Every structure is written in C-alpha cells, then in structure tokens.
Image (spheres, rainbow, N blue to C red):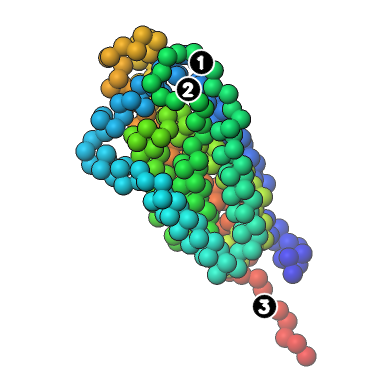
Amino acid sequence: MDKGLARLDPLAVHPRLSSRILCVVFGLLLLAASAGVWWLGVRTANGQNFDDEVWTLLDGSLPSWLRAMAHMLTASSTIIIISVALAVVGVAVAAIRRRWWLLGQLVVFTALCYGSELLKGVLPRPYLQNIDSSPNNTAPSGHTILAAAAAVVLVCAVPRAWRAVCALVGSAYALLTALSLVAAKWHRPTDVVMSLLIVGGWALLMLAFTRTTGMDEIGTRTASASIQIVGSVMITGGIMIALYGGYLLWQIASGLSLRAQWTQAGACAATVMLVSAASLLVFGLVLALRQLTASPLTKLGLVGAPPAPPSK
C-alpha cells in the first residue's frame, strides 16, 4: 500500500527532503551548542566562577512568584511523576492514533536521552577556581533531560490541533524544572542549559527519520495557524532572549574573574534569560519541524487517497 501511495504522491509516505535536511542541520547545531555551553562553563575559569556565583545566589534573586513555582519542583519524586505521566500520555496517544513508526522513533529518542545522562560520569571537570559548589562534574542534568524529553514525547505524539498547546506547556515545565534545580543547588546553570540543548538536538535528529505512520494520517494533513504563530513566537523569542542574555554575560565578564559583587545581579538575570531562551528555542523548533515532517501539504494529504475500485 505504501508503494502505491508513493507512486501517487511521494509525500504521502515521507516528508520533503528539505524538511529532513532542516531537522539534521538544526539538530546538529543544538548538539554543538550544548558542547559549547559545557566547554565555556566547565573548561574556563570565568565559566566556573559564573556557575558558582549563580549556584549560590539564584534562589534569593528570583521574584517571589517565580520562586514559589520553582520550589514546587524541588522534590525529585515530583519531577519523576510529572515527567513519567507526560511520557505515558504521549505514548498512549501515539498508540491510539496507530502511529507505529512514531512509537519506534520515540523509543530511540528516549534511549538517546538516557544515554546522554551517562555523560555525567564521563566528562571531566578541571580544577580552575576555588568554588563553593561540588568540585565534581554535574553536567548534564538528568532531571532536566527527563522533564524536557517527556514533554517532547507529548508534543510529537499528539494530533496537530494540540501541538501548540503542548509545546507551550512543555516549554514552561522544562523551564521551571531547570530553574528549580539550580535554585535548589542540585545543578549549575551550565548543566541545565546543556541538557535542554541535548534533548532538542536528539529530538530534531529523530524527526529527520519521520516516515509512513510517523506522519499524520493521509486526509488530515493541513496547515495550522496556532503552530505557525506559537512556533514563530517561541523561536524568535528564544533567539532574542538568548542575545540579551549573551549581552548581560558580556557586560559582567570582566568582573567574573574577581568574583566582583556588582556581577551578581547580572549573572542571575543572565541565567534566567539563557535558560528561558534554551527552552523556548528547543520547543519552538520541535513544534515547527514536527509539523513540517508530519504534515507536508499535498492534495493527497489534504483529501486522502482515491477510493479503491469496487470489487466484482
């Protein structure tokens, strides 16, 4: 049947080549960015000072409303329960929709994310500065990977009408989880930003292999105003916030080596900005590229396959 549909319309069984190339390019860029974040935060003296300063001060610098929300996720069991619930709902929805290839993709994606957590025991952390936080490597953050990966599973599994909403919820959940882990002194800023980018990179590479039952069902494929608006806002917002966070880092860079007191407010603000930017950018890209790979617009995708001839 797939071969017959492919002859009628190749996009019935696989996304456009350009969409798959975009997934690979952006996926590799996010993975490269995660490596860059780790190198800057761990392999440079200013990076270690920045991480340690934020690790010490972030909780007291957060607005009261944000601190209250972040503290709701400071228990490991809470993060695990919510994340498992999101993932189970995603898998159940994919099974109900009979998206069997997608289920396979999600299994591979989950395995890659789990494997990435093992980097914590492999990556080195050189002694460059006297710090108050643990001298051992703590990157990447397993809880951040769990939260972000579970939300990605849900975004990829739900039908088109729910993708934008799930992307917003998933981004907010991943952001609050990441900030709560830093505020509770479980992790450094480098750990959580790196983790978000790792999840985003694996998710986009997974989407590059979308085909057949990994796509939306033929006859239901159409454009989505909510995905276009939400995806555009999340990606643009993520880029702009990241640029502003980078500007704050540049402003305080000269004082980090001295642990100057005037860098403290800027370091904490930059952390909130950069974690927010990473979460928005990752989920905005996943939302947009999931739509591109799941619903390529063609006549066959819109109206469905032609009826079979009547049997004699």
- Mark closest to the chain's N terminus, 3 or 2: 2
- In this view, the residue in front, 77 or 168, is 77
Give the alpha-carbon distance from disc 3 to disc 2, as whole Å. Answer: 66 Å
Residue under the point 45% across and 19% down: 47
What x and y, as percent, mark residue 80?
45, 51
Q: Quadrant of the C terminus?
A: bottom right
Q: Quadrant of residue 68?
A: top left
Contact (Cβ within 8 Å) of mark 1 with mark 2: yes
User: Which residue has dot 2 on it?
Assistant: 135
| Relative side of 155 to 219, left or right | left
Q: Amino acid at mark 1?
A: Tyr
What x and y, as percent, mark residue 57?
30, 26
Against 157, residue 72 (above or below) is above
Q: Quadrant of residue 252?
A: top left
Q: Amino acid at mark 3?
A: Pro
Q: Secondary structure at mark 3?
A: loop
Q: Amino acid at mark 2?
A: Pro
Give the alpha-carbon distance from disc 1 to disc 2, as whole Å. Answer: 7 Å
User: Which residue has dot 1 on it?
Assistant: 127
